[in-house]
Image: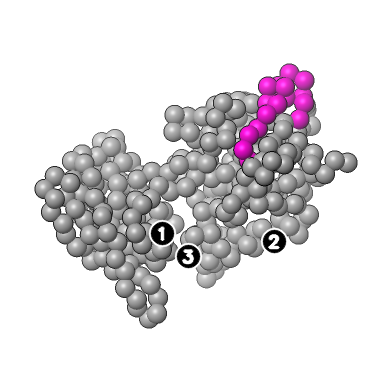
């Protein structure tokens, strides 16, 4: 048996990809996970996860993903830290059932009867000094993941779109004060989404401003966010704002670049699934499935991604019985 021919290749090693691997391997499918450059995905930069069932005291994001990865390995699944550069034979797969060919950045090549894409999406960041350094130490890209750590605290949300409005509304339920820093003089959101914050007494909107500096201090030997500097992009006025938490909500980018021209994508490059009446996780190309944040721009939760990975693997198992 050729060691580079598989029943299913799973691209991505976050909750969606690893859960898919568990289900696929237990279904008797020869499975491999291509973990990419960041095994475990975005969850590995989350300090504490307390909304994933089964961990009464919460668990570190890195610890959760290492446990998932070990479970996958214990079942006998191979995990390679490889990136996909190209998928070919997708036209032939439709007409004569030839295997997909998955070309890797290492120049190696795999063949597979099916593919599950679970590459996730990454938060867009401001790109200013100390931002990445303070992720998990006051800076976050996910309000629903980290909001509970800021109960009765002062926080700021950067962004003027739908996600920023929803994040600010969500945070107002636990934070003492929520500032919204919007670089324009209007929102890019529906009226219903705007109303979540415009009519919220705990939310103060600061128009025409951008975050230009993030500052930290050391408390109890731990690096923590202390304040931000904002700048009015019309007047040039600068202001220091002491805050406990900064939530960046300026968008997310799905990791789907290698799929352009292969499967149908939305204008924002999220993968389109659900068009098949039976296999709801399948793309428009029979045999290519998708799960997690690369196709879900709404929920963005580890538990939802894990469930989607399970569904994709079940679809693959059922699909392979009829092709």
Which tag, 3 or 2, sits closer to the chain's start? Answer: 3
Q: Is residue 274 visible?
A: no
Label 1, secondary structure: give it.
helix
Mark 1 or 2, which is nearer the eye? Answer: 1
- How far is the residue under mark 1 from the one under mark 2? 27 Å
Image quarter in which the C terminus is found: top right
Q: In this view of the protein, can residue 126 be seen by the observer?
A: yes
Marker disc for residue 322: none
The residue lying toward the viewer, choosing from 266 and 274, is 266
Label 1: few (<14), some (14–19) or many (≥20) C-alpha neighbours in 10 Å = some
Vertical comparison of 86 with 123: above or below: above
The percent position of residue 202, horizontal first and vertical second, equals 22, 56
| Residue labelled with disc 1 | 132
Query: Which mark is on residue 47?
Result: 3
Q: Which residue position is annotated with label 2?
A: 70
For mark 2, give the secondary structure.
helix
Q: Are marks 3 and 2 in contact (CB under 8 Å)?
A: no
The image position of residue 50, as x and y in percent, is 49, 63
């Amino acid at each position: 048996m050729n060691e580079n021919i598989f029943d299913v290749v799973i691209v991505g090693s976050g909750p969606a990809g690893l859960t898919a691997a568990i289900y696929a391997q237990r279904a008797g499918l020869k499975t491999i996970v291509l973990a990419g450059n960041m095994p475990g995905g975005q969850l590995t930069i989350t300090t504490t996860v307390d909304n994933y069932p089964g961990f009464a005291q919460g668990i570190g994001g890195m610890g959760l993903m290492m446990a998932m990865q070990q479970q996958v390995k214990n079942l006998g699944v191979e995990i390679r830290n490889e990136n996909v550069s190209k998928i070919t034979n997708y036209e032939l797969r439709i007409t004569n059932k030839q295997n997909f060919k998955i070309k890797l950045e290492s120049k190696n090549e795999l063949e597979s009867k099916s593919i599950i894409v679970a590459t996730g999406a990454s938060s867009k960041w401001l790109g200013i000094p100390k931002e990445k350094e303070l992720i998990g130490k006051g800076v976050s890209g996910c309000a629903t993941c980290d909001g509970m750590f800021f109960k009765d605290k002062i926080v700021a949300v950067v962004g003027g779109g739908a996600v920023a409005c929803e994040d600010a509304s969500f945070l107002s339920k636990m934070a003492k004060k929520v500032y919204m820093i919007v670089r324009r003089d209007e929102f890019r959101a529906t009226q219903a989404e705007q109303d979540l914050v415009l009519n919220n007494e705990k939310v103060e909107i600061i128009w025409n401003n951008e975050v230009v500096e993030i500052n930290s201090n050391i408390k109890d030997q731990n690096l923590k966010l202390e304040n931000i500097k904002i700048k009015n992009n019309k007047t040039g006025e600068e202001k220091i704002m002491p805050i406990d938490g900064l939530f960046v909500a300026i968008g997310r980018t799905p990791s789907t670049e290698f799929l352009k021209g292969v499967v149908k994508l939305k204008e924002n490059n999220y993968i389109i699934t659900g068009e098949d009446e039976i296999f709801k996780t399948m793309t428009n190309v029979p045999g290519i499935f998708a799960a997690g944040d690369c196709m879900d721009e709404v929920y963005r939760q580890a538990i939802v991604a894990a469930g989607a990975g399970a569904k994709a693997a079940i679809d693959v198992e059922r699909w392979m019985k009829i092709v």
